[in-house]
Image (cartoon, grey):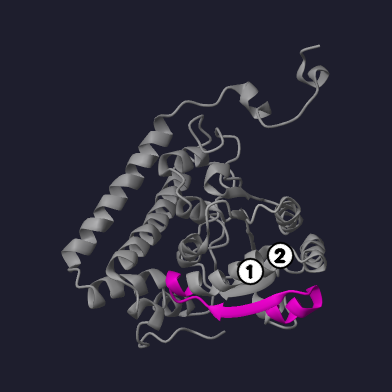
């Protein structure tokens, strides 16, 4: 496993970015980080039930994706979906309330951590079953091509999903039908707790792209502007040429697979080594070293965001439970099953 160089200079994409856009990226990445940390505390206090998969360490992908998208483009995600929802502009209160299973949640408290959804903001769902969302995303892209709406679907999956049958089916159809879709593998080095070299005979996942009729791109994430530019080219290709792409982004998660995972499978010193290349810290460095913000100014931004997330937790905790019948709100059932007959 290649470890980041702690003494490496800031990447060119960060060095050339303007102050306003760098500050925006820093603030939004930090919002995801602090949201996830607040959610983790809620989980340990028994406020959040079920699974909780945190996005800590991968924030640059969600923010860079948002910067590359147009209005109307769609995200179809895995269960590690909080970062995408926040990046797309979903309200932090509603997101936290969804984790708490409350009526004020993003989908009324019935989806929980793994099923965030906000159609108006292009967040077309997190999916809990590994790999099974890939054909769903392909269906979105087919609809765009059929109707000519000019929209692009971005389908995110983990490296553990690339061996799942529906993944192959969805990618095969996307290549066969030349659909406007970008498949993005967020390769965070572990399939749950199994390292990549024990799950894939060929570690470069994009070597599969030609067999599906897809273009390919692979890179190690450094900052959101790099993601914006690399995904932006794949999105342009999908929109203008109806050419699908398989993109593999090498990243790293700083927490376990879920809150129940102590991550004891990591090598000694591995976590600390990857923290040295944390994209959030790279953006923080750029804000200070290039754009002149003082430590106090950066801390003030952090304090403001921490207060926002603390307020979101209070909002979620004080919100009411959904009514029992709300569980049927988005399900098509006949009157006999519902009991109206």
Q: Residue at x 33, y 59 (%)?
A: 27
Q: Label 2, on which residue?
A: 161
Label 2 or label 1, whichever comes before in sequence order: 2
Left or right of residue 164, residue 118 in this image: left
Q: CA distance from mark 2 to mark 1?
A: 9 Å
**The disc label shown at residue 185, or none:** 1
* Along the viewing direction, whichever of 328 and 198 lies nearer the viewer: 328
Using the rendered image of the protein, determine whether residue 274 is visible from the camera's viewpoint. yes
Using the rendered image of the protein, determine whether residue 11 is visible from the camera's viewpoint. no
Question: Within 10 angstroms of label 1, few (less than 14), some, or many (20 or more) residues?
Answer: many
Q: Residue at x 57, y 73 (%)?
A: 233
Please identify the residue farthest to the top as the structure is shown. Answer: 341
Q: Position of residue 329 (x, y in %)?
A: 65, 28
**The disc label shown at residue 225, or none:** none
The image quadrant of residue 312 is top left
Left or right of residue 113, residue 136 in this image: right
Query: Is 88 within the magenta?
Result: no
Q: Position of residue 105 (x, y in %)?
A: 50, 36
Question: Within 10 angstroms of label 2, few (less than 14), some, or many (20 or more) residues?
Answer: some
Quick check: marks 2 and 1 in contact, CB under 8 Å? yes
Q: Position of residue 130 (x, y in %)?
A: 71, 57
Q: Which residues are magenta?
A: 205-226
Left or right of residue 5, residue 307 in this image: left
Q: Residue at x 46, y 51 (%)?
A: 86
Callout 2 secondary element: helix
2 or 1: mark nearer the eye: 1
Q: Residue at x 37, y 63 (%)?
A: 25
């Amino acid at each position: 496993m290649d470890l980041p160089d702690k003494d490496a200079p800031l990447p060119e994409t960060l060095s050339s970015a303007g102050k306003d856009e760098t500050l925006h990226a820093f603030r939004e990445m930090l919002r995801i980080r602090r949201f996830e940390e607040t959610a983790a505390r809620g989980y340990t206090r028994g406020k959040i039930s079920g699974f909780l998969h945190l996005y800590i360490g991968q924030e640059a992908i969600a923010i860079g994706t948002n910067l590359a998208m147009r209005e109307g483009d769609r995200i179809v995600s895995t269960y590690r979906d909080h970062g995408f929802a926040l990046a797309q502009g979903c309200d932090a209160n509603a997101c936290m309330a969804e984790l708490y299973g409350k009526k004020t949640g993003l989908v009324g408290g019935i989806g929980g951590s793994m099923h965030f959804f906000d159609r108006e903001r292009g967040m077309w769902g997190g999916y809990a079953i590994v790999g099974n969302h890939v054909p769903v995303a392909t269906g979105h892209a087919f609809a765009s091509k059929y109707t000519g709406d000019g929209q692009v679907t971005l389908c995110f999956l983990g490296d553990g999903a690339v061996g799942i049958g529906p993944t192959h089916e969805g990618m095969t159809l996307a290549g066969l039908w030349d659909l406007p879709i970008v498949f993005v593998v967020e390769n965070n080095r572990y399939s749950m707790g199994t390292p990549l070299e024990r799950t894939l005979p060929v570690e470069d996942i994009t070597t599969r792209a030609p067999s599906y009729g897809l273009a390919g791109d692979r890179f190690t994430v450094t900052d959101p502007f790099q993601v914006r530019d690399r995904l932006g080219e794949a999105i342009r290709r999908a929109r203008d040429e109806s050419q699908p792409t398989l993109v593999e982004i090498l990243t790293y998660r700083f927490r376990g697979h879920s809150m129940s995972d102590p991550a004891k499978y990591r090598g000694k010193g591995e976590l600390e080594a990857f923290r040295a290349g944390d994209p959030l810290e790279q953006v923080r460095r750029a804000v200070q070293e290039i754009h002149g913000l003082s430590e106090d100014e950066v801390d003030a931004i952090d304090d403001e965001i921490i207060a926002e997330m603390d307020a979101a937790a209070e909002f979620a905790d004080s919100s009411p439970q959904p009514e029992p019948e709300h569980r049927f709100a988005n399900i098509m059932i006949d009157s006999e099953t519902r009991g109206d007959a």
